[in-house]
């Protein structure tokens, strides 16, 4: 019997899941994981008060404060000390109550030190209204607007306008676990040009796949979402490039950081390729066995083996993404009714986000 490419990948994926399950059950592997975790923790310091790039699990892993301070070394940069945080959580931690005194897992909100240590004003928006009291406690300064609101491509602009965010605000962070790239595109299209952009990407989508969830009212956003959330690093870089941004770093846990190209001279920062960033995202932020939020539906390591034949990679991802959509959105019809792009062409996502 001759297997199709997708059937072959499915067979390999099943084998990997079975193998990884067996490996995880062995005491020896548990011990190794424990040792690795201790090593990683010893290298990573809190990002909530870091003013230098103290944590370097990969060559280009940088903190928000490190990148911003580098940009401000450019003598032609005029800071306005304004930062926007879309997806603010409790203001201190991106996963509320998971940071503690020493944030060893990188869950500390990257905008918090700008507000707390550098006296930044700004806008902090969180979609869960139950977190607003915590947001107000953790960010007590009166010059920071704390808002409970769902963030969409439309409301994003309304929020920025109402709060008089500068077009060239110093820092813009976008991490909403849903249609992140659609919101980012809307902000850039409207004319905003933040000096630094930090956005969460879906690291389980390998280079050079273009993936992005597009806006739909009623989208169910849950942490992980069976892999159906956000956008691929390839798409995030492809959307920002035409607006004059360079990719300069990755950041814990699933983020990448862009800086306006005209501001990079004199900063010491260097643009990196999408492929470099993707490899570092996998190294810092994915399980060694390649199993992540997609679970049994996909395996990053197996997909990444076919980087030089992206058409094969894309075919293998189609059923995984579709099933992840159905699972995460709890579709009663058994069909995915949320628009998304899965392709090898960034322009497809741009056109669909605009429609």
Image: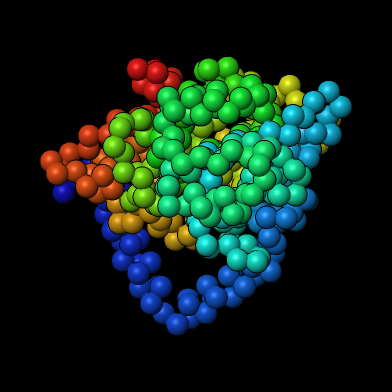
Going 47% across and 76% down the picture, which residue do you hit? Answer: 29
Classify residue 142 by image quadrant.
top right
Question: Residue 232's spot in the image, x, y percent?
Answer: 46, 37
Q: Residue furthest front?
A: 142
15 to 343, vertically: above or below: below
In the rendered image, the quadrant that contains the C terminus is: top left
Figure disc tally: 0
Of residues 177 and 26, which is closer to you in this image? 177
Q: Which colour scheme is used?
A: rainbow
Residue 5 at least partly seen: no
Going 86% across and 27% down the picture, which residue do you hit? Answer: 75
Decide if residue 24 is on the left or right side of residue 53: left
Q: Residue furthest left?
A: 333
Decide if residue 5 is on the left or right side of residue 267: left
Going 33% across and 62% down the picture, which residue do you hit? Answer: 17
Residue 111 at least partly seen: yes
Question: Residue 268's spot in the image, x, y percent?
Answer: 81, 36
Question: Residue 62's spot in the image, x, y percent?
Answer: 69, 47
Question: Residue 305's spot in the image, x, y percent?
Answer: 44, 47
338 to 22, vertically: above or below: above
Of residues 326 and 119, which is closer to you in this image? 119
Classify residue 352 by image quadrant.
top left
Q: Residue furthest right?
A: 75
Classify residue 340 by image quadrant.
top left
Going 35% across and 30% down the picture, which residue do you hit? Answer: 215
């Amino acid at each position: 019997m001759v297997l199709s490419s997708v059937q072959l990948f499915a067979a390999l994926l099943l084998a990997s899941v079975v193998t990884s399950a067996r490996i995880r059950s062995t005491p020896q592997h548990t011990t190794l994981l424990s040792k690795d975790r201790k090593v990683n923790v010893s290298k990573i310091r809190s990002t909530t008060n870091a003013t230098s790039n103290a944590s370097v699990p990969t060559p280009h892993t940088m903190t928000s404060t490190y990148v911003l301070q580098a940009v401000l070394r450019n003598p032609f940069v005029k800071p306005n000390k304004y930062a926007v945080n879309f997806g603010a959580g409790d203001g201190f931690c991106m996963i509320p109550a998971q940071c503690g005194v020493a944030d060893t897992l990188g869950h500390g909100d990257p905008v918090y030190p700008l507000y707390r240590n550098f006296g930044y004003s700004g806008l902090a928006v969180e979609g869960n209204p139950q977190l607003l009291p915590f947001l107000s406690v953790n960010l007590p300064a009166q010059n920071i607007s704390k808002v409970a609101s769902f963030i969409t491509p439309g409301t994003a602009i309304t929020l920025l306008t109402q709060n008089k965010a500068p077009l060239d605000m110093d820092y813009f962070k976008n991490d909403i676990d849903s249609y992140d790239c659609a919101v980012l595109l809307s902000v850039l299209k409207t004319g905003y040009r933040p000096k630094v952009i930090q956005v969460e990407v879906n690291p389980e989508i390998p280079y050079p796949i273009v993936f992005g969830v597009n806006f739909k009212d009623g989208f169910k956003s849950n942490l992980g979402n069976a892999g159906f959330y956000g956008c691929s690093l390839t798409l995030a870089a492809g959307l920002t490039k035409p607006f004059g941004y360079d990719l300069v770093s990755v950041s814990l846990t699933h983020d990448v950081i862009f800086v306006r190209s005209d501001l990079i001279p004199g900063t010491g920062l260097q643009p990196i390729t999408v492929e470099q960033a993707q490899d570092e995202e996998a190294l810092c932020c994915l399980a060694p066995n390649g199993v992540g939020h997609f679970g049994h539906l996909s395996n990053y390591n197996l997909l990444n083996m076919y980087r030089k034949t992206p058409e094969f990679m894309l075919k293998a991802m189609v059923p995984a993404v579709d099933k992840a959509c159905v699972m995460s959105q709890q579709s009663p019809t058994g069909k995915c009714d949320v628009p998304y792009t899965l392709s090898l062409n960034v322009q497809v996502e741009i056109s669909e986000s605009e429609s």
